[in-house]
Amino acid sequence: MTDKEMSVYDHIGELRKRLIIVGSLFMASVIGGFFLAEPIIVYLQHTEQARDLTMNAFRLTDPIKVFMQFAFLIAFIITFPVAFYQLWSFISPGLYEKERRVTLSYIPISLILFLSGLAFSYFVLFPFVVSFMMGLANRLEINQVIGINEYFQFLFQLTVPFGVLFQLPVVVMFLTRLGIVTPQFFVKFRKIAYFILLVVAAFITPPELLSHLMVTVPLFILYEISIIISRIAYRKAKLAETKMELENMNKD
């Protein structure tokens, strides 16, 4: 067995160990989510967004389905920063010391952005969409009977993708610092990226122009911010490389 093969096996073993850590934490968090899901579901049914709605279960399994969805969502949020840390730990041996410190700071930023995406979609977008749908039903003289499963599925459809999409600046910064992509790539890719974001926004929102724009415009702004962040990260990466080269030349 060659040294190279040993190195590959070592990497696989290290990755396996970190995946086990993330998987074990996720399962433990699901168990913890069982205790948190009920009060959160009850609370969300009495917030301003759902105050005028009466929740109904159309199937016997609807309550347990909603309960399990919340338990898994809670587990995902808890596991999210740990998964990022394990990813960082896996690739950090290949980074310079300064790059390790910088990329480690991305973990809390990523969590903040994820929660910000959830908050924006829940407190800004979701009430608008619900109000629009209820108003349309009233104008059409339709008596709406709200299913609790359908209500929370719609809530998840709007909020969770937004939390994930708000990771774009961190992902861009991370890939740029690793030298995988450059700002020029994101500028060249802009038109295709805009089209993809338009399609994603169409899947997230109901078929209605104003709510579609309320999702699309922030995503476009987020992409432009990501380009700016990529340029800053790229300059810093280049400066770090130049400084390291000068230090090595001075040592020689």
Image: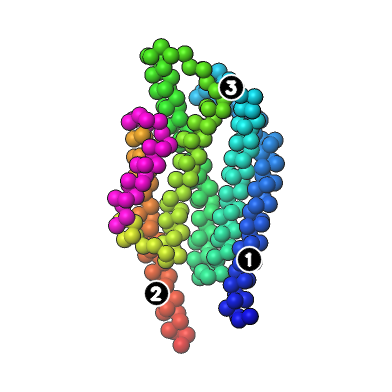
- Label 1, on which residue? 14
- Residue 216 lies, in percent from the top left, at 35, 39
Left or right: residue 176 versus residue 9 is left
Q: Where are the magenta residues, as a range? A: 188-211
Q: Which of marks 3 and 2 is in front?
A: 3
Q: Quadrant of the N terminus?
A: bottom right
- Residue 104 lies, in percent from the top left, at 54, 59
Quadrant of residue 130 within the rendered picture: top left
Residue plotted at (70% across, 41% down): 31
CA gap, disc 3 to disc 2? 64 Å
For numbered disc 3, what is the local secondary structure? loop
42 versus 251 height, above or below: above
Numbered circle sitting on residue 58: 3
- Residue 80 lies, in percent from the top left, at 57, 49
Numbered circle sitting on residue 242: 2
114 versus 234 height, above or below: above
Residue plotted at (63% across, 66% down): 14
Res 224 seen here: no
The color scheme shown is: rainbow
Residue type marked 3: Phe
Q: What kind of secondary structure does the magenta stretch mostly adopt?
A: helix
